[in-house]
Amino acid sequence: MIWYLIKLVLTAVTIVLVSEVAKKLPLLGSLIASLPLISVLGIIWLYGETKDMEKIASHSVGTFWYVLPSLPMFLVMPWMMRKGISFPLSMSTGIAMTGVLYFLMTRVLAKFGMNL
């Protein structure tokens, strides 16, 4: 139980740190957010709980392929907001677009024998 509490606190602190830094220094917040902190924490938690190298390797490869279709959201959202489109609509569009791109990515990778 203590392990889950440690995981929860460290993960939450990481997310809160990013949002608090971004309030004062948006570019530094962006830099911190762009680091694969949550992915690294996830890999550490997975290793600590399973020591299963194959699961960790699969997780790492999957993370790489799933990051790619999420990147356009970070260009589309600010573009929409700068055009006067509301934050909720811009965010919803970014999330929906990312979902579609995830779906397409898994389809394309499956054609090459990779099943995520």
Image: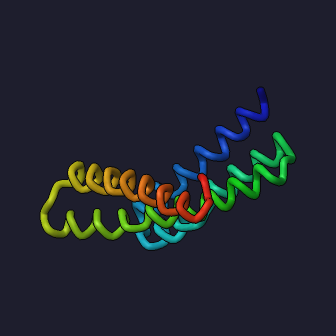
Does residue 2 lie above or below 81 as drawn?
above
Q: Where is residue 99 drawn, in percent x and y?
A: 39, 51
How many numbered circles are shown?
Answer: 0
Coloration of the structure image: rainbow
Q: Residue furthest left?
A: 84
Q: Residue furthest right?
A: 51
Q: Where is residue 45 drawn, in percent x and y?
A: 75, 46
Quadrant including the N terminus: top right
Q: Quadrant of residue 100?
A: bottom left
Task: Depth check: give the residue in front, 98 or 112.
Answer: 112
Residue name at image x 28 percent, y 63 percent: 77
Q: Name the side, left or right, on which 3 lies relative to 74.
A: right
Q: Name the side, left or right, on which 103 lies relative to 38.
A: left
Task: Depth check: give the residue in front, 22 or 68.
Answer: 68
Residue name at image x 68 percent, y 49 percent: 42
Task: Depth check: give the residue in front, 49 or 114.
Answer: 114
Residue name at image x 19 percent, y 69 percent: 82
Q: Where is residue 86 drawn, in percent x and y?
A: 17, 54
Q: Where is residue 71 drawn, in percent x and y?
A: 43, 67
